[in-house]
């Protein structure tokens, strides 16, 4: 089935992925491409959205897209930088703003009988984020909306289906943002709303069958949402020709290897569990640097996975749980990779020497879509609701070198924290939670004895996609109970702290 597609041209805005996700929430397929790498197959796209940008249209480094085959040919929605770009280079004027145009604002004027603002009233809240402003509209423009500070908040250009706004409809703070996108894409551009989890499953299963045929496929399971949904999709398509390998790197949560293995077998997957704990701990011996630890864990995994894959006769394909943000982030708006904060365990795959073709059934969808697809496939909601867990596992939650004893301590602490969140009904209010074992000892008193033992930090954050995150204000009574349980039940720990840093500037993990 051929879906109507929206092309999103990325000028480097922090919100670009959010635009794509909002469009997809309308059951319309969208793709993000850098502004300077417009796809050759433009006929496949029925509409185009121009994103915001940290750049200024007035600067020497203004980003210039080639819109010659788009302007007047396809419906365009220009957001923020896109709106200013169209104004500045089409007879209008953009200048530095005299007033602060960042944050919440309200529409004080909306032009009557405009389908773009259908069912949106004056007073509706929008989110502004720009230092420049449009002083004069471009040629042949019609003003559609204003706020008290921004006269030219929205406009359209006559003679073409081009609409422009200086606010961000994709962020939650714009209360009617989804309605505005629907007005444009469905009522004005005429796109069909047929991109659903069920259609994705049907088309992906067919794609896998046509691509893989009767070949054997090997997949490394992690226990997480992405690899689990990928496994069930592949299993639906090729059944027993899918060989799943679940490696215990010795850095999983307490009892996770046994529990997850049992869960996978209950799902009818052809899965083999490999306990390689000692091999990973040996590879990590004495290593303190976080990046070196990640590399050691990654290399050990490749070796174990390669050994196991070679035991499967005539395997030709490697399946991976790559999702759309992994694909987008490998190419930034300027065409190069964005700044590397730390190496990512999902990107890059396995080395060339494995000589396997790669199949990535989830590479077109976001994490929230992966969960919806999993629901359509009938996967246990508890598995789909699991918090993200880093590929290197507890290896990057133990600061400094790693030993079996430190792993034991952190597994016990983590288990008390996570089970506590579940029993208090807090688990689903948190996007990700975990404990960090700090490389410091502190003085304490237990009974009448002086102790000098480890300190652990608890971390719980709320987020949509991990790009930004806020710490969760957990109840004091809960933190008090968990702290008491950890100190009383986990030998080697005498102090518990709670991390109240947001991302940015802190990252979610400590390493």
Image (tube, helix red, strand yellow):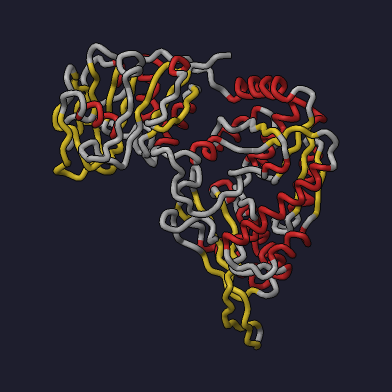
**Within the image, what quadrant is residue 186 found in?**
top left
Q: Residue furthest front?
A: 353
Query: Can you say which quadrant of the picture contains the C terminus?
Result: bottom right
- Whether residue 392 is visible here, answered yes or no, is yes
Q: What is the x, y in percent for residue 75?
A: 35, 17
Along the horizontal axis of the image, is 283 left or right of 266? left
- Whether residue 481 is visible here, answered yes or no, is no
Q: What is the x, y in percent for residue 396?
A: 60, 60
**Within the image, what quadrant is residue 321 found in?**
top right
Look at the picture and state if 148 lies above or below 307.
above
Query: Can you say which quadrant of the picture contains the N terminus?
Result: top right
In the image shown, does 102 or 421 lie closer to the viewer?
102
Residue ID at (50%, 23%): 29
Residue ID at (26%, 29%): 83
Along the horizontal axis of the image, is 157 left or right of 427? left
Q: What is the x, y in percent for residue 149?
A: 17, 37
Q: How many marks?
A: 0
Look at the picture and state if 434 lies above or below 55.
below
**Within the image, what quadrant is residue 128 found in?**
top left
Residue ID at (51%, 65%): 498
Residue ID at (17%, 41%): 97
In the image shown, does 509 or 330 lie closer to the viewer?
330
Q: What is the x, y in percent for residue 219?
A: 73, 39
Look at the picture and state if 123 lies above or below 54.
above
In the image shown, does 199 or 446 lie closer to the viewer?
199
């Amino acid at each position: 089935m051929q879906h109507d597609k929206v092309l999103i041209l990325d000028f480097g805005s922090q919100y670009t992925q959010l635009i794509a996700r909002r469009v997809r929430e309308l059951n319309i397929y969208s793709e993000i491409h850098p502004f300077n790498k417009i796809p050759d197959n433009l006929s496949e796209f029925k509409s185009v959205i121009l994103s915001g940008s940290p750049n200024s249209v007035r600067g020497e480094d203004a980003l210039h897209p080639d819109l010659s085959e788009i302007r007047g040919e396809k419906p365009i929605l220009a957001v923020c930088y896109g709106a200013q770009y169209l104004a500045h280079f089409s007879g209008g004027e953009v200048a530095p703003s005299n007033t602060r145009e960042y944050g919440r604002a309200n529409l004080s004027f909306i032009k009557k009988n405009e389908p773009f603002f259908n069912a949106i009233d004056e007073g509706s809240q929008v989110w502004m984020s720009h230092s420049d402003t449009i002083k004069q509209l471009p040629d042949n423009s019609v003003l559609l909306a204003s706020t008290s500070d921004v006269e030219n908040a929205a406009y359209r250009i006559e003679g073409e289906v081009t609409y422009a706004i200086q606010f961000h409809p994709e962020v939650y703070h714009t209360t009617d943002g989804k309605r505005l996108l629907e007005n444009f894409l469905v009522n004005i551009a005429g796109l069909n709303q047929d991109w659903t989890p069920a259609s994705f499953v049907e088309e992906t299963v067919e794609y896998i069958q046509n691509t893989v045929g009767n070949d054997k496929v090997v997949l490394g399971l992690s226990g997480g949402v992405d690899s689990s949904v990928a496994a069930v999709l592949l299993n639906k398509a090729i059944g027993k020709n899918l060989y799943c390998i679940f490696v215990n790197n010795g850095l999983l949560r307490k009892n996770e290897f046994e529990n997850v293995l049992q869960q996978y077998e209950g799902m009818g997957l052809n899965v083999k569990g490999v306990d390689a704990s000692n091999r990973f701990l040996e590879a990590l011996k004495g290593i303190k640097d976080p990046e070196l630890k990640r590399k050691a864990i990654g290399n050990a995994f490749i070796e174990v996975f390669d050994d196991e894959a070679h035991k499967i006769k005539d395997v030709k394909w490697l399946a991976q749980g790559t999702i759309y943000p992994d694909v987008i982030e490998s190419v930034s708006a300027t065409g190069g990779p964005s700044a590397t904060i730390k190496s990512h365990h999902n990107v890059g795959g396995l080395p060339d020497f494995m000589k396997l073709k790669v199949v990535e059934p989830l590479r077109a969808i976001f994490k929230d879509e992966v969960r919806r697809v999993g629901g359509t496939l009938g996967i246990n909601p508890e598995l789909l609701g699991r918090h993200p867990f880093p590929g290197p596992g507890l290896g990057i939650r133990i600061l400094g070198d790693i030993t079996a004893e430190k792993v034991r301590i952190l597994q016990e602490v983590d288990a008390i924290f996570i089970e506590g969140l579940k029993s208090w009904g807090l688990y689903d209010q948190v996007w990700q939670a975990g404990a960090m074992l700090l490389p410091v000892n502190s003085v304490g008193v237990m009974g009448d004895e002086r102790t000098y033992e480890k300190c652990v930090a608890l971390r719980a954050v709320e987020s949509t996609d991990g790009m930004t995150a806020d710490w969760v204000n957990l109840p004091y009574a809960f933190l008090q109970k968990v702290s008491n349980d950890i100190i009383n039940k986990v030998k080697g720990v005498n102090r518990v702290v709670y991390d109240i840093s947001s991302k940015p500037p802190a990252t979610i993990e400590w390493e």
